[in-house]
Image (cartoon, rainbow, N blue to C red):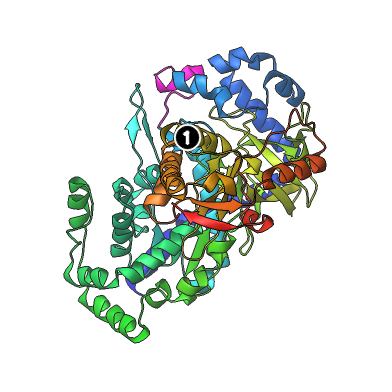
Amino acid sequence: MSLKRFLLVRVGRLVAYPTLRKLRRFGAACETPEAVQTELLLRVLRNQQHTAFGRDHGFPAVRTVADFRKAVPVAPYEYVAPYIDRVAKGETNALLSAPRVRLFALTSGTTASRKLIPVTDEYLAAYRRGWNMWGLKMYRDNRGRKVAMRPIVQMVGDPEEYRTPAGIPCGNLSGYTAMVQKWLIQRMYAVPYVTGKIKDAKARYYVALRFSVGRNVSQFMAANPSTLVQFARTLDAEKEHLLRDLRDGTLRADLDIPPDVRDWLTRRLSRDPGRAAELSAAAEKAGRLYPTDVWPEGGTVINTWTGGSMGPYLRQLPQYFGNPPLRDLGLLASEGRMTIPLEGGTPGGVLDIWSHYFELVPEAEIDAAQPTVLGAHELTEGASYYILPTTAYGLYRYHISDLVRVTGFYGRTPVVEFLGKGHRFANLTGEKLSEYQVTRAMDATVKQVPQPVTAYTLAPVWDDRQPYYALFLEEPDAADEAGLRRFLAAFDRQLGVENVEYAAKRDGGRLGPVRAVLIPAGTWAAWDRERLAKTGGSPEQYKHPCLVGDIAFRDTLPVVREVAG
């Protein structure tokens, strides 16, 4: 072991010791989830009672969980949005007792406008604590691979896309946390955080690879495994340019990179002719260059989501990365970390009962007028629930639309896995497309491009070459095929207007353009009757779904043919 490696490992052990103590205390807390959760909830309400939201909802009078449930309704982002808008304009106490909002984390929501999630010091403390406990357990479980204190490949977004009227930055949470990491931790990440400022997808992946191929990478980290698949494909497609740049210490001049970012990156480039020659020989021998050719699987770990709709991408990873251990990142979003996976090979993670107060509604009751609402200590193994977090930074009984299933218990605290974004969402590559966005895109498109649409449903379709969304239409609506193609192209563009993540995945090539899938005349009427009979609802209240998130939906219909946009 080199002196540098020895010193890094020693520093790592010193840094890990406080986290190990927290992990042991967390395990003890998980034996009494009801007490821990109640104490957390009442502390949050005490701290926030003098905010405008707290006064409007009677926080000073809340003494019990029952009081809280009477005072605050279960609600989506739109309910708290007016208070967040006031914070964005500088009135922090409208929602928060914290003196400062560090960032508004941006996320795609169920409305046309993007959601702003306040990131305070308390938010960051909880976020880091969860990551540290997750990371320590992952490292300890993979000690034989010697991954500790070796470089990590993680691509992040732009930490500041714009600022609010009060000057608060709005941007990507992972980009922000990477930017504010301590110097030692930043050194562990192969990809510089400034790559989040690169908008062109090809350039962003290329730069990530340029800064990674010369380093002894231990981990690949991406929320969505589709990112890792694209990373691997770009490596092979651009291998000649990459190895030339590695040999010469350069960065391709034809990449679409902002000048200030290129200048920052160029000053940090190094040349490694030996490594370039080694990889060139490997590529010539294999006729390709995949991550497993650059970083042997025996010394790596892949950290990514493994639940929900990730299966098609996970099945592709061995082709490119071999078969290193897979570690789920847990249920986490801009709204915060909800679970902490403490074992590998499973999407299940224990609820982070230290950070948020959790309520859960049985799947079948989510649309009921008076649904059953349960605490974390009241769940049943094998059952599915919608999760409603209450946070210390202004989200209360927040209906995030995440559906989870209980797979076991850690102590007496549930271990849950993410199933999906519920019946109003579809998610192939991280776009989290909502039915609201689909209907808005359709309404806008039919006004721009004449096209008969008697009834329709949009659904994701898996394709090994490039997944896409299919617009299911009855065959008579496709009488003018040339007009339909124009309509599909306009609808595809409008989906990107409504959902910026959809636009990003299309620009990056991770999603193909919308296609029309034609079904026989009368299919929708029969399908609706059958569905209504199963649900037992009334015809007056029934609504034909404009979005179905099931990746196998195409297989359930009598398809006549497809029309590409």
Q: Nearer the viewer, residue 545 or 161?
A: 545
**As drawn, 236 above or below 537:** below
**As drawn, 417 above or below 79:** below
**Which residue ends up furthest to the bottom in the rendered image?**
285
Q: Nearer the viewer, residue 119 or 435?
A: 435
Q: How many marks do you count on the picture?
A: 1
Residue 173 can be seen, yes or no: no
Residue type beneath disc 1? Val
Which x, y percent locates residue 184? Answer: 35, 54
Q: Is residue 89 magenta?
A: yes
Residue 87, image quadrant: top left
Q: Nearer the viewer, residue 518 or 266?
A: 518
**Which residue ends up furthest to the front in the rendered image?**
479
Q: Residue at 42% across / 26% down in the picture?
A: 100
Q: Residue at 45% across / 72% down in the picture?
A: 320
Residue 180, image quadrant: top left
Q: Main secondary structure of the magenta part?
A: loop
Which x, y percent locates residue 248? Answer: 16, 70
Which x, y percent locates residue 349? Answer: 64, 52
Which x, y percent locates residue 107? Answer: 47, 38
* Residue hosting label 1: 446
Label 1 residue SS:
helix
Left or right, 94 with respect to 540, comes to left
Mark 1 nearby-residue class (10 Å; few <14, some 14–19, many ≥20): some
Report the span colored magenta: 87-102
Left or right, 249 with respect to 460, comes to left
Q: Quadrant of the N terminus?
A: bottom left
Q: Is residue 329 magenta?
A: no
Residue 110 can be seen, yes or no: yes
Left or right, 380 with respect to 201, comes to right
Q: Nearer the viewer, residue 233 or 129?
A: 233
Q: Residue at 54% across / 51% down in the picture?
A: 470
